[in-house]
Amino acid sequence: MSDCLFCRIVGGDLPSDKLFEDDLLFAFRDVQPMAPVHILIVPKEHIATLNDTTLDDQPLLGHMLMTARDLAADEGVGESGYRLALNCNQEGGQTVYHLHLHLLAGRQLTHLR
Ligand code: AMP
């Protein structure tokens, strides 16, 4: 998927502010942060949207959540609080069609916008 932005970031073809990487996941700071902490957690495998996941992806999805929790702790916002958001398709606000979880924190998050 050489035309996929996040595949290119995961592959190192495009730069990123990387925070975490393992066999399955890659996490980096969002280039247009909507909060003081704004991290994207993405699977290394190209999966376009949440709708494209299968039962086989259940461990991967759980791993994304627990990695987000650990990154929140690393960023010092585990106790103050954080939001995880996963946008799916156009009306869900998805703009990059490679599955990703947003980790937002560092300010009072009240409304979903
Ligand atoms: P979404 O709207 O849920 O698809 O989120 C895509 C996110 O990717 C947005 O918050 C963008 O700011 C972010 N983004 C786009 N290009 C880059 C990039 N090169 N590095 C880091 N984040 C990016």
Image (spheres, helix red, strand yellow):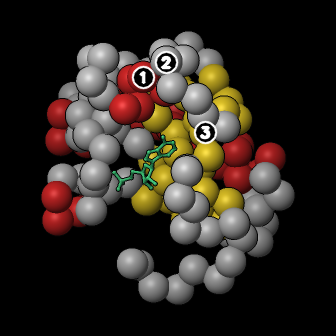
Is residue 91 visible to the viewer in this orientation of the structure? yes
Which residue is disc 1 drawn over? 8
Seen from the viewer's position, the closer of residues 86 and 94 is: 94
Q: Residue sitting at 71 percent across and 43 percent down?
A: 70
Q: Residue sitting at 37 percent across and 32 percent down?
A: 5
* Disc 3 residue type (three-letter): Phe
Q: Nearer the viewer, mark 1 or mark 3?
A: 1
* Disc 2 residue type (three-letter): Asp
* Disc 1 residue type (three-letter): Arg
For marks 2 and 1 on the same chain, the one whose residue lies earlier in the sequence: 1
Which residue is disc 2 drawn over? 13
For marks 1 and 3 on the same chain, the one whose residue lies earlier in the sequence: 1
Q: Element at badge 3?
A: strand
Which of the 4 quarters of the picture holds residue 4? Answer: top left
In the rendered view, does 53 fall on the left or right side of 79? left
* Ligand 1 closer than 8 Å to label 3 CB: yes
**Distance (Cα) linking label 2 and label 1:** 5 Å
Seen from the viewer's position, the closer of residues 63 and 93 is: 93
Question: Residue 62: image x %, image y %?
Answer: 47, 37
For the image, the number of numbered tags is 3
Q: Residue sitting at 70 percent across and 45 percent down?
A: 71
* Ligand 1 closer than 8 Å to label 1 CB: no
Question: Is there CB contact under 8 Å for labels 2 and 1?
Answer: yes
Circle 3 packing at 10 Å, graded few (<14), some (14-19), many (20+), is some
Question: Is there CB contact under 8 Å for labels 1 and 3?
Answer: no
Which residue is disc 3 drawn over? 28
Seen from the viewer's position, the closer of residues 55 and 105 is: 105
**Distance (Cα) linking label 1 and label 3:** 13 Å
